[in-house]
Every structure is written in structure tokens, then in C-alpha cells.
Amino acid sequence: MNQYVANLRRLLAVAAAVSLLSGLTSAPSRAQADAKPADPAAAPKPAAPAKPAAPAKAAKVKKAKPPELSLEEQKKADGVYAKGTNWLSFRAGWAKRTGELAGNGSMGYGLGYQHMMSRKWAFAAGAGYDVVGRFGASADEAVPFTGEFQRHYKWKTAVRPYVGVGGGFYLRKHYRTAGEYTTTTTGGPHFSFGFTSALDARHVIGLEARVAKLDARAGIVNPTFGLSKDSETVWTVKGSWALTY
């Protein structure tokens, strides 16, 4: 009996040992079976590389304008056409009104002032006396007061041309005619074209042609100069001499 119990105990011990060993070996197997491979889609995506910062634009630096030359320095470079130079001039020449019974052209003269706003642009003003028509002792007179802007052009010669656009008003009168009427005023635009040339640092000579389109008193009948129209054209060609300062 004792031998039987001893054998039974041996069998139980062997069974327990086998059961213990099988449990130890199955645990890693289950652990390996439970560990599933990671889903590639579920894995965190690597961060995109940072874009390099755009280079900062260099601030634009405005070029500083060179200081303006003094009047004396400009006169050395541009002479009588230097910016800021003034001209006082005397003009004399020929004047003529167009139209039927206008009479012969006659003389005209006047005074002028000119200021050079730059070596290219100038403002000019003047007043004068023109006999725009004549029949014997009878005269058709005009006294203009005008202003204009001029554009001067530099040539590689001592002579410089210019063009001018302006206007003004005129005192008009027929003199020594049987149907003489009192002085009246009129006005209109004009266009001028001329040449100038410096004699030296203080003196300038020139020649200018000008055409003016003026309003007129329509319906006035003069026994010498005929029926007046609502507009008239006056031409002048004058030489000039100017003192600059």
C-alpha cells in the first residue's frame, strides 16, 4: 500500500512538472501571437522639412538729388539762358492786319520782359504799338499787352530757336478816317517763332515772327478800311535787343 501511494505521488509530481513546463513555453508563444505588426498608415508621418525663409528684400534707397547750382555757376554753364536770368528787351519791326481793305503793313515797336524758368523754358510779357494798316494818313492801330510761355532749343551754334504760345488783349482804333470810332478792346491767342543769339554775357539779339487771332467788332463800317468782321489776324515780324541780368 505504501508502495502504491509513493508511486501515485511520483506520477502527480511528474504531471505537475509537465504542466508547469507547458505553461512556461506557451506564454511567450501567446505573447508573440498577440503582438500584431504595426499598421503603416497608423504610424505618425514624419514632419515635412521646414521651408527656407525667403531672403529679405533690400530696401530701395532713393538717390539724393545733387544740390542745385548757384546762379553764377549756372551762368557759367548756360550763359544768358541760365535758370533765373531776366531779359529786358526793345523790339521794332513790321506789322500787318490781313483782310480786304486792310491797307499796307507798317511799323511797330514795343518793350518786353522775359524770365528763364529753366534753361529750356521761359515766360515772356510785353507791350507795344503797331500800325497794322495804312492808307495815306489814315492808320489802323493796335496796342498789344501780351504774355506767353516759350520753349528754347539748344543748337550747336550761337543761334537758338524758340517757339511761344500765349495771348493778350489789344486796344484797337482807326485813326484819321471819316468814320472814326472810339478806341475799343479786343483779344485772342497768338503763336510766335523766333531766334536769339548772345552777343556777350549781358546782351542778346533776336528776331521773332508772331501771328495773333483776335476778336473784332463785327458790322462796323469804316469808309477807309471797310466792313469789320467778327475776327481778324495780325502778323508782326520784329527784331530785338535785350539786356540780361
Image (tube, helix red, strand yellow):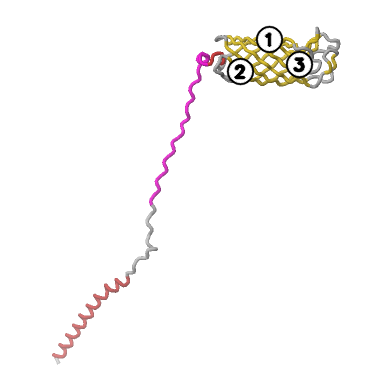
Residue sitting at x 19%, y 83%: 14
Residue on which disc 3 sits = 97
Disc 2 element: strand
**Upstream in sequence: badge 2 or badge 1:** 1
The x and y percentages for residue 51 are 40, 48
The x and y percentages for residue 151 are 61, 21
Instruction: Tell me how far mark 2 sits from mark 3, CA to CA.
Output: 25 Å
Frontmost residue, 171 versus 81: 81
Q: Is 206 positioned to the left or the right of 230 in the image?
A: left
Residue on which disc 2 sits = 161
Local packing at callout 3 (Cα closer than 10 Å; few below 14, some 14-19, many 20+) is: many
Quarter occupied by the C terminus? top right
Image quadrant in which you'd find residue 189: top right
Disc 3 element: strand
Q: Identify residue type, mark 1.
A: Ala
Q: Is 120 positioned to the left or the right of 178 in the image?
A: left
Q: Is 59 positioned to the left or the right of 88 in the image?
A: left
Instruction: Tell me how far mark 3 sits from mark 1, CA to CA.
Output: 17 Å
Based on the picture, tell me whether residue 57 belongs to the magenta stretch: yes
Which label is found at residue 186? none
Q: Identify residue type, mark 3.
A: Arg
**Upstream in sequence: badge 3 or badge 1:** 1
Residue on which disc 1 sits = 92
The magenta region covers 49-77
Residue sitting at x 41%, y 41%: 55
Based on the picture, tell me whether residue 179 belongs to the magenta stretch: no
